[in-house]
Image (tube, grey):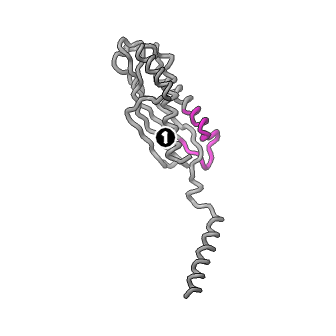
Amino acid sequence: MRSKHLIVILGVLFLSGCASWFTSPTDSKRVTSFYVKSLHVNLKEGDWGKPNNKAFSSEETLSKDFAYSIQKSLVEHDVYAVKPDKHSAALVITIDYTRRYKYGGEALSRPLVSHIIQVYQHGQLIATLKRSNYSPINGFFSAIVINFMQAMHLWDKSDEHIDADNISASMIDQLVDKFDL
């Protein structure tokens, strides 16, 4: 009876040792890096905005700001795919961005944002990440300064790229957490 148990245990150990020599099919699909396949920002003007105000970024310019910020954040997390390979995934990103103004329409408040990130590997959708109705998050000390500037109506068109950077960093943090990178 003991010899049967010993044979079974040795057989399991042998087979588990042999299995470590082979890569599993899921390993070949493991995602280790990302690149942006497409990105679109849907810009909506909030209350108190002046119609056709050219002082603030257009939807196209805001899309470029986000593309730059997202790529920068991917590089900072060391998950940017310079060239697509078998372990990289393509990102299709849609951002709904509501620009919110302070009374008078010259200064900005925090934008209201929703995003969808679709992750494709080898042409197949493998994940969808969503987040709705949030505002950019800043570090503690940065938040104090930004809140003060916004309260004093000093946060304007030249500061909108900071919001894009913070939103992009939050999106890439969500992505990195999802894929445990």
Where in the figure is residue 91, as x and y percent of width and height?
52, 40
Judged left or right of residue 48, residue 85 is right
Judged left or right of residue 11, residue 172 is left
The disc labelled 1 sits on which kind of residue?
Gln
Q: Residue at x 58, y 37 (%)?
A: 74
Question: What range is drawn magenta here?
Answer: 70-90
Q: Few, some or many C-alpha atoms within 10 Å of disc 1 (few <14, some 14-19, many ≥20)?
A: some
* In the foreground, 51 or 145: 145
15 lies above or below 35: below
33 lies above or below 165: below
Specify the farthest residue to the left. Answer: 47
Where in the figure is residue 55, as x and y percent of width and height?
46, 13
1 lies above or below 86: below
Q: Is residue 46 magenta?
A: no
Counting every numbered tag in the picture gives 1
Judged left or right of residue 121, residue 43 is left
Q: Which residue is mark 1?
A: 174
Where in the figure is residue 156, as x and y percent of width and height?
46, 15
Q: Residue at x 35, y 14 (%)?
A: 103
168 lies above or below 147: below
Q: Residue at x 33, y 19 (%)?
A: 47
Q: Secondary structure at mark 1?
A: helix
